């Protein structure tokens, strides 16, 4: 497989599970084992949009138990002889080679995956990627010529990892307590998006847009939480350096 592979550095690695478990997009080439009309092929492919059940292939690193995944989009881009170019947007953990195999079974001719390219992983798309050659050159310039600008230009800030998550903006006076592990009360919140879900994750940012870390939402009734002085979120992963904000507690 080729394509998008997000790599985190330093404390940003703590947030990587959010990307690992996020929606993926692939472009793959499927080879049919027999002739099929294009209309019949597209009709069969649409049967796999939505919730599907998969058993991991024999050659896999996980237990071969049936699992449920969601295919959000499946588009047949091109058909040439027995080769089919498809674009698929799906949950993390969806096996594309198994999807190709199952489409072939439904068509009654059999099929297997020939090529696979990941074009999106969470917030990161293929046009945001860099080549190993470009990275190698930037590292060389940094180590041998002391020029670090090119390397820094290739690295995205940790805040990029929070894209797609609900957002909570914390007051500056609450940030220091948060980076020391304290829960977040409603009184320490400046603003938040409307998609907060109890038990779900949210990115906690400072008023300047810095990523504090990832929190688990304990409750969404802010006014009641404020009156009861109960926390609304608990930090799961902390990225921001403790020294950046003075203690106010």
Image (spheres, rainbow, N blue to C red):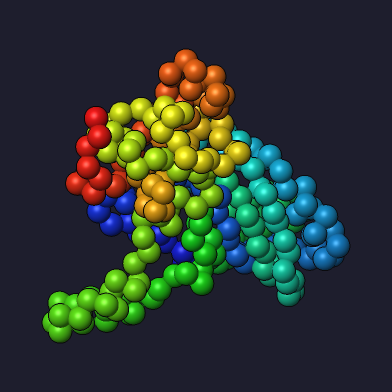
**Is residue 235 toward the left or the right of residue 43 in the image?**
left
Depth check: 234 or 208 in front?
A: 208
Q: Is residue 97 visible?
A: no
Query: Percent from the top left, x then y, of residue 15?
Result: 37, 46
Q: Nearer the viewer, residue 146 or 174?
A: 174
At x 82% / y 66%, what residue is drawn? 38
In the image, residue 66 sits, relative to residue 12, either above or below, namely above
Q: Position of residue 139 (x, y in %)?
A: 23, 75
Left or right placement of residue 28 versus residue 183 in this view = right
**Total count of labels:** 0
Q: Is residue 51 visible?
A: yes
Examine the rendered structure and indicate whether residue 130 appears above or below residue 91: below
Q: Nearer the viewer, residue 96 or 9?
A: 9
Q: Position of residue 50 (x, y in %)?
A: 71, 43
- Above or below, 114 against 178 in this view is below
User: Residue sitting at 41 percent across and 40 percent down?
Assistant: 170
Q: Is residue 174 left or right of residue 68?
A: left
Measuring from the top left, give residue 180's x and y in whole percent: 25, 34
Q: Quadrant of residue 61?
A: top left
Residue at image x 67%, y 64%?
86
Residue drawn at 49 percent across, 61 percent down: 124
- 181 horizontally vs 243: left or right: right
Quadrant containing the C terminus is top left
Residue located farthest toward the bottom when viewing the structure as drawn: 145
């Amino acid at each position: 497989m080729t394509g998008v592979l997000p790599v985190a550095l330093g404390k940003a690695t703590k947030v990587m599970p959010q990307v690992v478990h996020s929606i993926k997009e692939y472009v793959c080439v499927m080879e049919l084992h027999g002739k099929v009309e294009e209309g019949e092929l597209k009709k069969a492919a649409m049967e796999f949009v939505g919730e599907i059940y998969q058993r991991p292939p024999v050659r896999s690193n996980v237990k071969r138990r049936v699992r449920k995944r969601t295919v959000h989009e499946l588009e047949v881009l091109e058909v040439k002889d027995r080769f089919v170019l498809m674009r698929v947007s799906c949950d993390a953990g969806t096996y594309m080679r198994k999807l190709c195999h199952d489409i072939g079974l439904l068509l009654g001719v059999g099929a297997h995956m020939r090529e696979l390219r990941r074009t999106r992983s969470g917030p990161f798309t293929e046009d945001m990627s860099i080549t190993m050659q470009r990275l190698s050159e930037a590292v060389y310039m940094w180590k041998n010529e002391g020029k670090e600008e090119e390397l820094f230009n290739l690295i995205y800030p940790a805040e990029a990892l929070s894209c797609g998550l609900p957002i909570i903006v914390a007051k500056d006076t609450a940030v220091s307590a948060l980076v020391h592990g304290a829960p977040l009360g409603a009184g320490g919140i400046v603003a938040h998006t409307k998609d907060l879900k109890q038990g779900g994750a949210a990115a906690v940012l400072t008023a300047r847009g810095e990523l504090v870390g990832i929190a688990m939402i304990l409750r969404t009734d802010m006014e009641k939480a404020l009156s009861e002085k109960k926390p609304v979120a608990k930090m799961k992963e902390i990225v921001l350096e403790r020294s950046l904000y003075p203690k106010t507690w």
